[in-house]
Image (cartoon, rainbow, N blue to C red):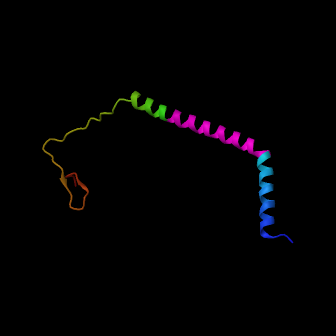
Amino acid sequence: MFGLSELAIILIVVIVIVLARKGPELARNAGKSARILKAEARAMKEAEKQQQTDTPPRIIQGETIQGHTEHPHPDGHRDTGRP
């Protein structure tokens, strides 16, 4: 029968044979995936930077009620002074 060391050697030989056939294809696919990921990340950064430069800051006009002041509510909610 085979011992543990013989099985390990056979397993290593099988892995080397499989990698010899599929290794270049796997490496090529990994390289393509890395290039695509890098290009997409670069495009996202450029789009974000472009969006920041294109959009001016928004100024929202509010209205002021004469003679009304807001007082903080004891439980943390806003007290608008209305019933």
* Quarter holding residue 56: top left
* Quarter holding residue 35: top right
* Residue at horizontal 48 percent and vertical 35 percent from the top: 45
In the figure, is residue 43 to the left or right of 19? left
Q: How many marks?
A: 0
> x, y percentage for residue 54?
41, 27
* Residue at horizontal 77 percent and vertical 57 percent from the top: 12
- Most distant residue in the left direction: 67
In the figure, is residue 32 to the left or right of 10? left
> In the picture shown, does residue 59 fall above or below 74?
above
> In the picture shown, does residue 21 fall above or below 4?
above
* Quarter holding residue 83: bottom left
> x, y percentage for residue 52?
40, 32
> In the picture shown, does residue 27 fall above or below 81?
above
Question: Does residue 24 show up magenta in the picture?
Answer: yes
Secondary structure mostly seen in the magenta stretch: helix
> x, y percentage for residue 51?
43, 31
> x, y percentage for residue 74?
20, 61
Q: Which residues are magenta?
A: 21-44
Question: Does residue 5 show up magenta in the picture?
Answer: no
* Residue at horizontal 69 percent and vertical 42 percent from the top: 27
- Most distant residue in the right direction: 1
Quadrant occupied by the N terminus: bottom right
- Most distant residue in the top direction: 54
* Residue at horizontal 81 percent and vertical 50 percent from the top: 17
Q: Nearer the viewer, residue 44 or 55?
A: 44
Q: Nearer the viewer, residue 55 or 25?
A: 25
